[in-house]
Amino acid sequence: TEFPVEISLSPLETADGLLVSAAVRDVSERKAAEERINELAALVESSQDAILAKTLDGRITYWNAAAQRLYGFSAAEAVGQHVSILAPPDREDEILLLLDRLRRGEKVEHFETLRVTQSGAMLDVDVTLWPTRSPDGAVIGACAIVRDISDRKRAEAELTELYEQQRHIALTLQRSLMGTPPAIPDLATASRYLPATQGAGVGGDWFDLIPLGAGRVGVLIGDVMGRGLEAAAVMGQLRSAAHALAKTGMRPRQLMQALDTVVADLNVPDQLVTCCYLVVAADSGEVVICSAGHLPVLVAVPGEGASTLSTPVNAPLGVGGVIYEQRTTTIARGATLVLYTDGLIETPGTDIEDQLTQLIGALDKLASAGLDLEAAADHVLTTLLPDANGHDDVTLLLTQVPAAPLATAGAELCAEPRAVRDGRGFLAATLCTWGFVERADDACLLLSEILTNAVQHAQGPIGLRVRRTDTELTVEVSDPSPQLPQPRVAAEEEESGRGLQLVRALADDWGVRPTDEGKTTWFSLRIDRPLAPRPTWP
């Protein structure tokens, strides 16, 4: 086996003459170390990253070729200089802080900062620093590897700008698809929508307020699972479909059944949608609700606190094969319905039940404090999302039933021809009592047409209900027939077919809505001046 040796010869004079002593030493390890040092030196010198060494007071002691290419200083120009020549004037304190950390034996990894070249150009750099030690472990200097990350920073800035542009476009699209709910007379509302602060920001949340006529309002809220433009696009289609279906007077369970089919027809794999639809009668406080897997609706009653509105449990839209159930309940005057999406109470690191309890607690305080809805909405968001750092978009909708009772009157008529006369008489007497004279003749004429239709096609009792506000008079006729009247053009020789045409011409608004018992046909007339106070009706 061959191995390197070091031989030392020393002459010795002895009685026998001159002798030579030879010492042979194995220097394999030293030779290997020298070769390793030479290799490392070659690697350092040929590195694409700038590498430099310095004393603890900041004087440069080593400067490789890459450092010269990066900064523009030659080794002769740089060695002996203080490292502060590489820092912009406003970052000299940064150099001192880094040297102080190195003296304490700390290693600084991937510190991103700005450095300046010999020509004055600014560079984005990534710096890694570590202390060098003597054999006894004392810190005697430091080394640094510096990498130019200017191209990466420019690319990151361009990506950030592009991302912000896309996020702005997506949010604009989502808000356009969500629309702006109209102001509803006799119904105070407040709404908030917060896009997610992470990712694309947009999601599938939506809400809608749909005037249904005759003092009824559809309140809709939904959440398409997922994030991004796909969820927003699905949301837009569902919102449009739900709005159109609700305008037909469809019952909440029927609307959910139809939306379930719409979700299936969208042909989006594994797409689930939670949704809740309520029909609120402002004058009576009656609420008909159907929920498709959505979070519970809360009710805040002044002086009583907040509670969950009882709702049948149904599967989300998109599951298929589900028969949706609805429930009818009555809420107190002045009560506020609180609808929201999961982004409000499902946050990382928290329990959804705890968050729901916190939400109910916040609403309890609002019910006792009597805040207006806008202030209440802000308080809820501040309480549940104090840092406003949402991982999901958030929708909050507050809807308050009027506290003051509205003037109403009602009667039950038999399904016989005399019902038309009796109904006209009842309406005329009621309007006279209320001081409504301007359009009383129009109201009685329209009632005659609707009652005639009910008498001809219905069996059983006919309900007549009259409702007024300061701006509108509404008359409703209910009968047990499920057949919905349709306006049509009557031929000259036909005796029927003109009643609904007359209703369309004279009424400011009218419609037909199906009920569990049959249907209700209604019309509204606008009031140009406030009505006289209603006396006590016997």
Image (cartoon, rainbow, N blue to C red):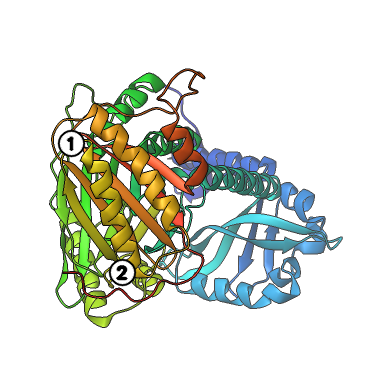
Quarter of the figure with residue 456: top left
Image quadrant where one finds the C terminus: bottom left
Residue 382: quadrant of the picture: bottom left
Q: Nearer the viewer, residue 94 or 50?
A: 94
Q: Which residue is drawn at 21% across and 37% down?
A: 479
Residue ID for mark 1: 415
The answer for how far apart the CA atoms under marks 1 and 2 are is: 26 Å
What mark, if any, has residue 237 been given in the picture?
Answer: none
x then y, percent, for residue 346: 27, 53
How far from the left and from the top, in percent, is residue 30?
49, 43
Residue 185, placed above or below residue 266 = below
Closer to the camera in the image, 133 or 255: 255
Residue with the mark numbered 2: 433
Q: Where is residue 396 in the image (x, y as percent from the top left)?
A: 36, 58
Residue 260 as seen in the image, left or right of residue 183: left
Please name the amino acid that badge 2 sits on. Answer: Thr
Whether label 1 touches label 2, CB < 8 Å: no
Amino acid type at mark 1: Ala
**Can you name the residue that lies furthest to the bottom here?**
369
Q: Quadrant of the N terminus?
A: top left
Q: Residues within 10 Å of mark 1 (few under 14, many from 20)?
A: many
**Which residue occupies the foreground of this view, 58 or 199?**
199
* Residue located at (38% from left, 19% from top): 265
For label 2, the SS is helix
Q: Decide if residue 54 is on the left or right side of residue 239.
A: right
- Lateral position of residue 96 relative to residue 123, left or right: left
